[in-house]
Image: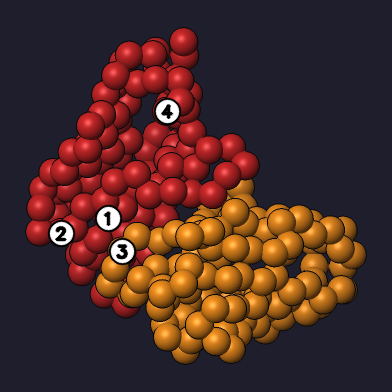
Chain colours: A orange, B red
């Protein structure tokens, strides 16, 4: 299996622009998580889905952030409009299920907002 | 929500010595405690985990201990090697299946 696939790996954009990050979970995994990693705040859970349904989005920092999972093999995290403080590495992770435990992380998308 | 504290933030050890990282958690309902290793520029990867019904688990040079009464758990790495140099994160999962991570420990193994 190719593992969790994220794109783009790197994104540099200007403040105010829309950013869309994409994730393909491991086939057969029912749960998908979006995390943000910064030096100051560490690994923060933004939102997670189970069977394509958003379960908890309390970690989404602002209304500028939104996430969707239209099917079992694809999810997006969108930031509109982007701000410099959104600069971070965004990780997508998947697991067999909510009680399965182990999260399999993608390589991450490094976002820089100028 | 769950609050996970991790110490120390940095740890430097001589090759062959042991390394110990400690974490505490706040929610007594937490029932799953994994440890992740993240090499520079890479993704976090699970190295060992423990559930609340056991007190200790070992996998070769790595071991984890859990004290539910005190709400703390620890990672022990014995006979450290240069490839053990990385950032290590502890985490705790509560009943709502949310995994909260500690701030991380940067481990440097000196040759």
**Which mark lies nearer to you, 1 or 3?**
3
Residue A65 image-quadrant placement: bottom right
Q: Which residue is mark 2?
A: B52
Judging from the image, what secondary structure is the residue with disc 1 in?
strand
What chain is tagged by disc 2? B
Judging from the image, what secondary structure is the residue with disc 4 in?
helix
Residue drawn at x 17%, y 47% is B66
Residue drawn at x 87%, y 73% is A16
Figure check: A65 above or below A4: below
Which labelled disc corresponds to residue A101?
Answer: 3
Q: Residues within 10 Å of mark 3 (few under 14, many from 20)?
A: some
Mark earlier in primary sequence (1, 4): 1
**Which mark lies nearer to you, 1 or 4?**
4
Q: Residues within 10 Å of mark 1 (few under 14, many from 20)?
A: many
What chain is tagged by disc 4? B
Whether tag 2 and tag 1 are in contact, CB under 8 A, the answer is yes
Q: Are marks 1 and 4 on the same chain?
A: yes
Q: Are marks 4 and 2 on the same chain?
A: yes
Whether tag 1 and tag 4 are in contact, CB under 8 A, the answer is no
Residue B3: horizontal and vertical position, in percent?
37, 60
Q: Which residue is mark 4?
A: B84
Distance from disc 1 to disc 4, alpha carbons, whole Å, reads 20 Å
Residue drawn at x 61%, y 70% is A23
Residue A88: horizontal and vertical position, in percent?
68, 56
């Amino acid at each position: 299996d190719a593992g969790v696939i994220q794109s783009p790996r790197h994104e540099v954009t200007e403040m105010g622009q829309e950013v869309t990050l994409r994730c393909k979970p491991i086939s057969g995994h029912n749960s998908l998580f979006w995390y943000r990693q910064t030096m100051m705040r560490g690994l923060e859970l933004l939102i997670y889905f189970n069977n394509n349904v958003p379960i908890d989005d309390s970690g989404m920092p602002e209304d500028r952030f939104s996430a969707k999972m239209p099917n079992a093999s694809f999810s997006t995290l969108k930031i509109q409009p982007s701000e410099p403080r959104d600069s971070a590495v965004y990780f997508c992770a998947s697991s067999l299920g909510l009680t399965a435990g182990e999260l399999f992380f993608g390589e991450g998308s490094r976002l820089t907002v100028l | 929500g769950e609050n996970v504290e991790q110490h120390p933030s940095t740890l430097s050890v001589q090759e062959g010595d042991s390394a110990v990282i400690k974490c505490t958690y706040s929610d007594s309902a937490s029932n799953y405690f994994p440890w992740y290793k993240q090499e520079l520029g890479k993704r976090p990867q699970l190295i060992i985990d423990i559930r609340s019904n056991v007190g200790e688990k070992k996998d070769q040079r790595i071991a984890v201990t859990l004290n539910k009464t005190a709400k703390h758990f620890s990672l022990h790495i014995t006979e450290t090697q240069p490839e053990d140099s990385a950032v290590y994160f502890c985490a705790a999962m509560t009943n709502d299946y949310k995994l909260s991570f500690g701030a991380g420990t940067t481990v440097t193994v000196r040759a």
